[in-house]
Amino acid sequence: MKGKRESLRQKIAKEAAILLYTGQEKEYKQAKIRAAKNLGVKILPSNREVAEELDRLAQELEGEEREKRLIEMRKTALQTMKALKKFNPRLIGSVWRGTANKNSDIDILILHDKPEQIIATLENAGLSIRRTERQTTEKRGERKHSFHIFLESSGYEIEIVVKPLEEAEIEEKCEIYGDKVTGLSIEELEKVLRENPLQRFLPK
């Protein structure tokens, strides 16, 4: 029975991964619910199980192109982060993890109270901003605000997430892998690109 249940979880995780990869769903939660419904069961895999299937699927379909793209995305991230050096940016998301696929964007985190200063710095660096938006999320009854700047550089989409400085003391847990989101600083990213440009940052 246990083996059958695990096999079902994997099937749902694979189905959810396909839904995410093909853009039919954007969020892990919705992808899992829809996948379970499609297969007529009520078991839901973890986000990590779906992420692992998504990673396998991307590798199978994209192969060497994927590795080349990851290096290019990390180099593009570094250029953008250097333009924002005074704000201590960190590379996060799938480009940090090393699991980016053809649908991924570059995610950069900045802790700062004045997003308009970041916008001005980007514009002065000749980077074209597509749009900005404020977001509010609620976790465990606590509301959190963030400011998002969307731009494009070297053909890649970049999302800069600006969070209040007061959140510097908060340890952020990854909703997919369950570990601490540490990301990479400019210096750490330079080291990765020098020594092991395809390095992955995944919990064991």
Image (cartoon, grey):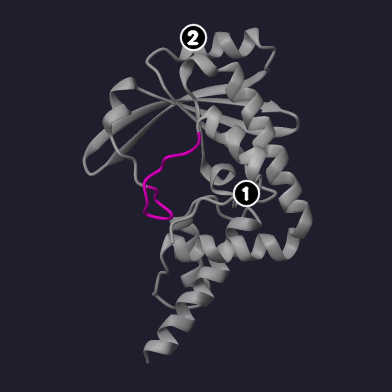
Q: Point out residue 49 in the picture as x, y percentages from the top left corner.
A: 47, 66
Residue at the image position 68 percent from the left and 38 percent from the top? 73
Give, as a three-letter code, the residue at label 2. Gln
Q: Point out residue 190 in the picture as x, y percentages from the top left corner.
A: 61, 32
- Whether 84 is drawn above or below 178: the answer is above
Residue at the image position 37 percent from the left and 51 percent from the top? 179
Residue at the image position 70 percent from the left and 49 percent from the top? 102
**Residue annotated with mark 2:** 117
| Residue farthest to the right, as pictured | 65
Q: Point out residue 95 in the picture as x, y percentages from the top left corner.
A: 59, 43
Left or right of 17, for residue 59 = right
Q: Point out residue 131 in the picture as x, y percentages from the top left corner.
A: 59, 22
- Whether 27 is drawn above or below 157: the answer is below
Residue at the image position 50 percent from the left and 64 percent from the top? 50
Give, as a three-letter code, the residue at label 1. Ala
Kindly indicate the quadrant of the structure image that contains residue 125.
top right
Numbered label attached to residue 114: none
Image quadrant in which the N terminus is located: bottom left
Question: Would you say residue 180 sits in the magenta stretch?
Answer: yes
- Whether 50 is drawn above or below 89: the answer is below
Q: Where are the magenta residues, as a range?
A: 174-184
Query: Is label 1 in a helix, a strand or a loop?
Result: loop
| Pick the front one: 81 or 104 | 81
| Pick the front one: 202 or 152 | 202
| Residue farthest to the front, as pictured | 195
Within 10 Å of the Cα at label 2, are there few (<14), some (14-19), or many (20+) other Cα atoms? few
| Pick the front one: 104 or 41 | 104
Question: Would you say residue 165 sits in the magenta stretch?
Answer: no
Q: Could you tell me how far apart the alpha carbons at marks 1 and 2 are, in whole angstroms?
A: 29 Å
Q: Give the mark, 1 or 2, whose residue is nearer the N terminus.
A: 1
Numbered label attached to residue 100: 1
Within 10 Å of the Cα at label 1, are there few (<14), some (14-19), or many (20+) other Cα atoms? many
